[in-house]
Amino acid sequence: MTSVATTDLVRGGRSTRTTIALKLTMAVSGLVFVLWVLAHMYGNLKAFAGHDAFDEYAGHLRTMGQPIFPHAGALWIIRAILVVAIVAHVTSAVILWRRAEGARTTRYQVKKNKHSSLSSRTMRWGGLALLLFIAWHLINFSAPRVNVTGGSTADPYDLVVDSFSTWWLTLVYLVAMLALGMHIRHGFWSACQTLGWTSTTRARHRAKSAGIFLAVLIAGGFSLVPIFVLAGVITK
Amino acid sequence: MTLTLKIWRQADAAAEGRLHTYQLDEVSPDMSFLEMLDVLNEQLNAAGEEPVAFDSDCREGICGMCSLMINGEAHGPEVTTTCQLHMRSFADGDTITIEPWRAAPFPVLKDLVVDRSAFDRIIQSGGYISVNTGAAPDAHAIPVPKQNADRAFDMATCIGCGACVAACPNGSASLFVGAKVTHLGELPQGQAERDHRVVNMVAQHDHEGFGGCTNIGECAAACPKEIPLDVISQLNRDLRAAMRHGH
């Protein structure tokens, strides 16, 4: 245990070097992800329109922006933004996590949580779980692509149907969507608070409600395709 | 009332501490929590043991000196300070665990007493307005809209007890800093130093070793003065403004 607290005063503090600057980085990158998952979820729902519509959409992702951008140019710009956002988000989170650990080196023998939601208290481990899920998800559907039934990976629609016909893989995705929903539920309102948009009670309640709405919309929307594939509604 | 008390005992800042169990009989429900500890200390004195060290001063809920984590809640189960908490909030036969505030910037000095001078340094780094001395100006020389005056007053009720830090899983003092920044930022007199204030106070907060805020809200729930989470948004907003202004 530290026996003496610091006694010196900081001179020449900079706003950009504060913990709040790290939180702002997390808020902005987090909102980028929210926009991204909304678009991604919309694209997934094309599976309900059948094989051709879904594959055409997958192909269109590569041709969008042409001829101003080269083939898959717009897609690569989006990917670059996402990579920058995830590096910024995770790096800031790790720095703040370490700070928080250092700020309470002796734990309480008894500690009650009076107000905080489960979502808010699972942001860090939940975020790590999501990071693992994203890694698997990219291996599954982007590169190198894995078909757990042993079938072909050439056709996007068929790969989706094969994957979610496998009950345990569907379960993995549904659990991941629960984690995503919880992360967005607290993350969205927390981002609004960090950006200074919730300086009244009313604004705070609105941001929290919007967080719950987005969480249900996104996690629910993503869950539809796996559930309907497993139920046999979406088939090859 | 008969109580079992588990109290953190630590001889000094360098010593290892541990929970010590005491039995206390004939506690009146009308006693304040600190009076209950006074009774315990009288017994300890009589038995030739070292009394339990704890902070207290005004004992009327306005000075911010008392603290104590009581059964895992800062200032105990009611929305008030420990000195204004009464034993009627507990039941006969209860076991009560009493620990000091836990935060690296609040090192334990002895038993339940922690060093909260980190808060003083945060105030010193920006929690003030600069005014010229001399004759007092007319009270109505600078008009303040009622809305602003009310909000400033509400946030000025922060007594700097540190319950927000104690309750926060990140050991963050954002509610405290937010209350001070909001209080002064609502008033015309606070505008001149507004950007410097927020940057310097947050820089000092970080330097002291407090954690970052994750907006989970345990601080506002623990605050005996009911400072709302709004002030943390205001703090972030002010910092962002200072950022735009190049500070």
Image (cartoon, coloured by chain):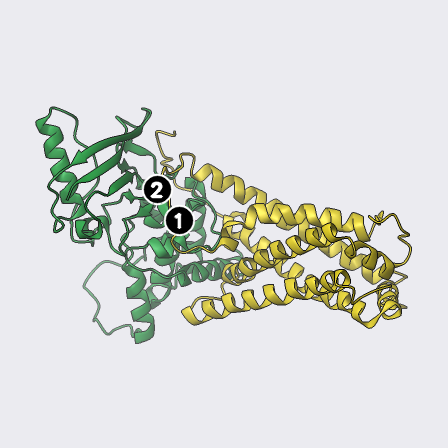
Q: Quadrant of residue B171?
A: top left
Determine the residue positioned at 46% across, 54% down: B216
Tags 2 and 1 both on a single chain: yes
Q: What percent of the width, then of the height, locates residue B151?
A: 33, 68
Residue type at mark 1 is Ala
Residue A223 appearing in the image: yes
* Residue B19 % position (x, y): 29, 31
Q: Residues within 10 Å of mark 1 (few under 14, many from 20)?
A: many
- Tag 1 secondary structure: loop
Q: Residue at x 73, y 56 (%)?
A: A81
Residue assigned mark 1: B173
Query: B180 or B245: which is nearer to us?
Result: B180
Label located before the other in sequence (2 or 1) = 2
x and y percentages locating residue B175 in the rendered image: 38, 54
Find out whether the residues at labels 2 and 1 contact each other: C-beta distance under 8 Å: yes
Q: Residues within 10 Å of mark 2 (few under 14, many from 20)?
A: many
Residue at mark 2 to residue at mark 1: CA–CA distance: 10 Å
Residue occupying the point 28% across, 28% down: B10
Where does the N terminus of chain B fall, quadrant-wise?
Answer: top left
Q: Which one is nearer the viewer's eye here, B6 or B42?
A: B6
Q: Is residue B162 visible?
A: no
Q: Which mark is residue A112?
A: none
**Which of B26/B45 is in front?**
B26
Which kind of residue does numbered mark 2 sit on?
Ala
Q: Judging from the image, what is the letter of the chain drawn in green?
A: B
- Where residue B199 sits in the image (x, y, percent)? 45, 52
Instruction: Give the chain letter for yellow.
Output: A
Left or right of residue A174, residue A21 in this image: left
Q: Chain of mark 1?
A: B
Label 2 marks a residue whose chain is: B
Identify the residue under disc 2.
B118
Would you place residue A42 above or below residue A127 in this image?
Answer: below
